[in-house]
Image (cartoon, grey):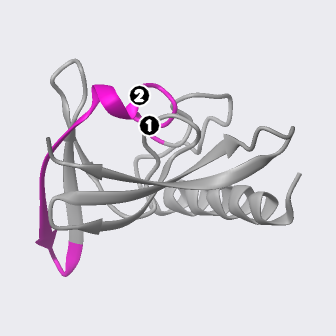
Amino acid sequence: MDARVKVFLLTACCLALFACAASEKSLGPDLDGPGSWGPLQDTVLLEDLELVETKIQNGQWHAYVRDPSGHTHDIIAGDFMGENTGRVLDIREDILVIIQIVQDGQGGYIEARVEFAKR
């Protein structure tokens, strides 16, 4: 496995554990697959999600993303969403920048940058 992918995975795990530890309601992460690091992580394809709006709230960008069931999720940078362990790197006006881990066609994995925009 490429060293950058290992660093990404380790960082993702640390961020998820830190987020869970910071939450008063959390019982800790369930590290057993889809949804382990949030309701949109590897549970729904990006194409099935809709970016409703983005706005700055308390000095931080937030994105509001609607899932196929009609539930709207409040997303911030660092949250996981979509397939391929997608993680939100940046939120801008009307766009989310997501990094995913995908196969490179040679038996390895690479990071792919995806822009998720309002339709």
User: Upstream in the sequence, badge 2 or badge 1?
Assistant: 2
106 within the magenta span: no
Q: Residue at x 51, y 34 (%)?
A: 83
Task: Please name the amino acid that badge 1 sits on.
Answer: Gly
Could you say whether the residue bearing mark 2 is in a helix, strand or loop?
loop
CB contact under 8 Å: marks 2 and 1: yes
Q: Which residues are magenta?
A: 38-60
Query: Residue at image x 58%, y 45%?
Result: 28
The quadrant holding residue 65 is top left
Instruction: Decide which of 114, 79 is in the foreground and name it.
Output: 114
* Neighbours of disc 1 within 10 Å: few (<14), some (14-19), many (20+): many
Residue 107: image x %, image y %? 87, 38
Q: Is residue 98 above or below residue 55?
A: above
Q: Residue at x 47, y 48 (%)?
A: 80
Please state the horizontal and vertical placement of residue 101, each as a whole percent of the image.
64, 47
Q: Which residue is situated farthest in the front direction here? A: 105
Amino acid type at circle 2 is Leu
Does 6 sit left or right of 118 as displayed?
Answer: right
- Coordinates of residue 63 in the picture (x, y in percent): 21, 55
| Disc 1 target residue | 82
In the rendered image, the quadrant that contains the C terminus is: top left
As drawn, the residue found furthest toward the bottom would be 59
| In this view, 89 is above or below 59 | above
Q: Is residue 40 magenta?
A: yes
Mark 2–mark 1 Cα distance, whole angstroms, equals 5 Å
